[in-house]
Image (cartoon, coloured by chain):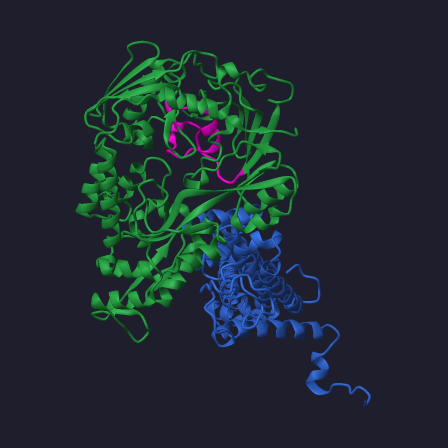
Chain colours: A blue, B green
Amino acid sequence: MAEAVRPRGLLAVRLAPRRPAIAAAALVLAVMGLAAVAAPLLTPYDPIATDTAATALPPGSPGHPLGTDLLGRDLLAGLLYGGRTSLLVGLAAAAMTVVLGTLLGAAAAAGPRWLDSLIARAADMLLSLPMLIVTLALAAVAGPSLATVIVAVAVTSWMPVALIARAELRSQRERLYIRAAYGLGLSGAQVFRRHLLPGALPPVASIAAFEVGHAVLTESTLSFLGLGIPPNRPSWGNLLTETKAHLLTGEWYTVAYPAAAIVIVIIAVNVLANAVAPADGRAW
Amino acid sequence: MRIPKLVIGAVATALLAAGCGQAAPGGRPAQAGGAGAASGSFTYAIGDEPETLNPVLQDEHTDPVTELVFRGLTRHDADNKVVPGLAESWRVSEDGKSYTFTLRKGLTWHDGKPLTSADAKFTIETVRDAGTDAPLSRNFRTVTGVETPDETTVKLTLDRPFAPMLHSLSVGLLPRHLLEGKKVTDPAYGRAPVGAGPFKLVTWKHGQYAELAAFDGYYEGRPGLGKIVIKYVPDDTARLVQLTGGEVDGANIAPQQAAKVKGLANLRTEVYPTADYRALMLNFKFPVFGDKKLRQALNHAVDRDAIVKSVVLGYGKPASGPLDESPYAAATPYTFDPAKVTSLMTEAGYAKDANGIWAKDGKPVRFELSTFAEESLRVAILNVAATQLKAQGFDVVPMPRPRDQVRKNWAGQQSFVVGWGTPYDPDSSVYGPFHSSEALSKGGSNFGEYANPEVDKALEEARSTMDEGKRRAAYERFQKALADDPPFVWIAYLQTLNVVPADMTGPQRRTLGHHGYGFFWNAEKWRRNAS
């Protein structure tokens, strides 16, 4: 074999010591996302269709690579279609959290003093409550649905985003380039849109990545407790709920699949989020 | 032919006493409080816990604790026939409108106070007047008067004959001295009930356990077990873990767990049939179910054997009607028959559309199938039945819902996996769900708003005749009418699995009730030999 060739050009930068993990994480997420999107192409089975002639098949059975559950539902199909729901919840909830948080943070930073106090105190108050309890209460009132889970995650996770956006905007406001923008004759709204907001985005992007993992986890928790995704719609959380009874009856893999999927997504997302985070040790 | 007008309960009493070997003169060791014999204890884990231990606030299927604490004027034997309980004998007048009960002598409540005819009168009148507070009040609507000529005689007067009356009087008697002047729903009494059954309640820690101790004053003598603890463990897996770990001596287990228990030498599994069936209730408010041919086709489109084999691993049997486990069983089984589905649907004017779904006038047969999302067995039946019906061209949307959501909106459920059935007198479990006067919109339990004049007539006749032959004929007509115009898609009768210690003697096979309740029906005769 020839001696290792040093990567050149752009690759030389991309493959810095911390980068292989990031590439791997991105790859894993991309594969999972693609698999979820292409679920109907990857499995011929309907994830909720039972098959009384093929119940409790072990992994590796012909036609059912991951096996089937006690009612003959294909576990691979459940995992793929479950990924659709869980990842959708993760992305949608993270997007909503970031939008809501950034808007509130911006409003606090740019708005009148009373609004600033109101938003900051509301955020502090919500931060002091255990999130799961707030989420459970919301889910219990609104009833289980996909939208409930997304809203519940957003409503209980916007505070860090808002507080960081607010702090970031406040510190940016005094910078020279902002003053220069005003000096050039830009209006307040223009400065805000073109300079202040983009300047505050990098730390927010890092939280956004974390939020995806957090939302996937919250979905599983809520669904596991019967308050998340409506029963019978495959999601990783619902799969865990349905199979938890099998932990002690020998079919441990029925629990292991969705659990592994959740863990892998969260690890990958955290790796990515750490990469986006600035190196100077800021909390978010 | 008339059935005998005079029922002498005493004969049955003698048989019962001989059977259990605890008649007073016999002097069994247990009764004498012999060393060790009566001190055996039994800790049993069960999934569901009642809100109250007051028997008249429960339905006729009572939880184990209520079952052990209370006794009625009558009770049921191993064949679910009515036999004497606190009453030693009774007479029924020829016209079925008058009942005279003679109580046993020397009966006492758990608190030592004497139990007299006044308590029986109090119980009957209280339940009758409780209205919607007590579901069992429906059984006493015909009672116009209760008289107590002396301490051991109770006379009931009815305005019309009511065939299930003797069965109805198996409801646990309530002590007048504790409840007079209070509401029957009194929560304090429901938490710490005093009855006259073989075991008295020592403590009830809600959400944890109930502890019962043998009642020395029980009319058949002191029970063989000294102590019974009913532990509430809602999670199936947790129950199995406690059982195998020795934390409990016995438990109600799921069919999927039977194999795990089988290998354990110190345990034995008692498998009893139940009269508890599962079916898909069709809601007649939705026009999709209007055609009876379509409902017949649905009944031929489910493979009941496959459901029994996969969902309950064979611990059950296919259902063909609501009375399969009753002495009045007369329904012809529905076969799984795709050809019949096709011919019935074609006769009814349906044809398969491009998606392979039966359709008429451009409207495909599509409906939601729901059930309580918390009950894994019902959800499993829902999913398997939905898949089977889909395969036969019915677009069924499986949609389990949380219990609270369903209870607020029964009328909105298009079809639903229901559980009904009773091993006792059939009336209560067929009149409610199938008589048109009991429709949901009229406050009854006919949730699907089923209405069939023939069924109504047969049900009315069956409950109001005292002639056993006529009653049988009426229930036959009822089952025939149901088969022709099906309100439900019948699925399966369940069996119930209870694990007991290997050294336990006494549990006797009987067809049990809803939730498998009734396992402790003869617990006064149970004993443990090793302990």
**Residue at horizontal 28%, vertical 24%?**
B129
Q: Residue at x 40, y 17 (%)?
A: B175
Which residue, as the protein is rendered here, is positioned at the far top?
B150
**Is residue B101 one of those drawn in magenta?**
no
Residue A273 x/y as whole percent: 63, 66
Which corner quadrant holds the N terminus of chain B?
top left
Of residues B148 and A6, the one drawn nearer to the viewer in this rendering: B148
B454 versus A157 height, above or below: above
**Residue B441 location, quadrant:** top left
Q: Count numbered badges in the picture.
A: 0
Q: Is residue A158 visible?
A: no
Q: For residue B253, which quarter of the picture? A: top right
**Residue B131 image point, x, y percent:** 28, 29
Q: Residue furthest bottom?
A: A2
Between B495 and B6, the residue placed more toward the observer is: B6
Determine the residue positioned at 56% across, 19% down. B28
Which x, y percent locates residue B445?
A: 29, 41
Question: In the rendered view of the protein, which quadrant contains the C terminus of chain B?
Answer: top right
* Residue nearest the viewer, comparing B332 with A189: B332
Q: Residue at x 50, y 52 (%)?
A: A119
Foreground of the two, B510 or A101: B510
Is residue B282 toward the left or the right of residue B377 in the image?
left
- What secondary structure is the stretch in magenta mostly built from? loop
Magenta highlight range: B46-75
Report x, y in % for residue B203. Answer: 54, 25
User: Would you place residue B39 above or below residue A102 in this image?
Assistant: above
